[in-house]
Amino acid sequence: MIYDADKLYIPAEFIARHDLAARNLLAHTSKEQPVGGGQPCLFPKLLLAGAPRPFTAINVNAFRVLNVASLAQGQAAGFGAPERIFKSSGTSAQGRSLSAFSAEGLEAYKASITKGFREVLATRGFSGERGISLIPAAAAWPDSSLAAMLEWLAEVMPVDSFDGSRPFDFPKNAPVWIFGTAFHWVPLIDQGLLPVLPKGSLIFYTGGTKGRVRDISEAWLVAALAQGCRVPPSQIISEYGMSELASAAYTVPPLDSPSNFSPSSSQKRALGFQKNVVPFIVSGIANEGEALGALALTANQSGTGLLGVFDFNRIDLPLPIITEDVARLAPDGCFELLGRAHTAPLKGCSLLAGT
């Protein structure tokens, strides 16, 4: 059962006190006092079941409403000034988050993303060498972490770009992988331009379509891609990521999924984060919050609620990050996205989950 997201997941008190906490942290944190290092702060306290102590956490909304980007400047383990700042994929009418990475943090991000992607290819038995990106180049999307991801992949493996100006071109007998957002895939589907892919090929999709093309469901997208490209649904992979993290999650292969996430019991597809990332579920607000000096949130390593992550690849900001996505998490770390909390602004990485 999903609780009342308006009251539980993003209550007005949470937002107000979290905003005050961020301003307090920006004003008082120094190199001698790293983020979350004991200074007075009203960031939410995370009471994770089984953990020996509460954790200081940061809600992803803070990246949107405050200059959390400056937290990366000399705040985490003495790292330097921001090298690159990414912006989230929120709609044009809403504030976009700023997520800063130092030079060291950017290298860790790059290594994490490329390693995680190559592990997915290996897990799926991909025997090809080439990839095709539908994502605009980083020069066209300079603020996009997704464009940066495809740029990084192109540094370690052959990746061709496809902008629709010419037909797909690839060896007919060699498997390829193709990566695109949902709003890049839908026009190709509508115009009958999907290529029939060689056996063993993989299709990756991410994000939703709101504000770009007509709204679609994930089930419709997977079915259309499978039919048009002649690729089994098991070879069509969802990528879940966000600019605030340094890691990504991908659709779990069916045989590796827990039984309660099998296709026969759920229309949604289970996701699993890459290594060095630990997901959790925020399930409620604790009564002990005032005693702890901050809003306290109860959390568990399984169940249904607000998805949170300990992303140990995000070295510039060593705090658990609470997303505003509602998910159902299994004990083995696999999860289903169920949609956005009702009061949360839309983000591209989870738009399909709510359709």
Image (cartoon, rainbow, N blue to C red):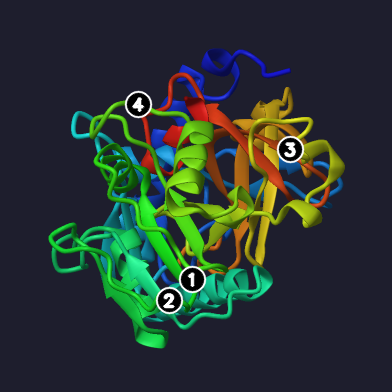
User: In this figure, which residue is indicated by the disc labeled 4?
Assistant: 215
Which residue does the numbered mark 1 point to in the structure image?
113
Would you place residue 198 above or below residue 186 in this image? Answer: below
Q: Is residue 319 visible?
A: no
Which is more N-terminal, label 4 or label 2?
2
* Relative to 104, 234 lies left or right: right
Q: Is residue 223 above or below residue 204?
A: above
Whether pointer 1 and pointer 2 mark residues with C-beta atoms closer than 8 Å, the reply is yes
Amino acid marked by disc 3: Pro
Label 2: few (<14), some (14–19) or many (≥20) C-alpha neighbours in 10 Å: many
Q: CA distance from mark 2 to mark 4?
A: 32 Å
Give the Cα separation between the discs numbered 1 and 2.
5 Å
From the image, state whether disc 1 or disc 3 is nearer to you: 3
Q: Nearer the viewer, mark 2 or mark 3?
A: 3
Secondary element type, mark 1 = helix
Image-quadrant location for residue 45: top right
Front-most of residues 222 and 136: 222
How far apart, in angstroms, are the residues tagged by discs 2 and 3? 33 Å
- Percent across and percent down for residue 341 are 51, 25
**Residue behind mark 2:** 110
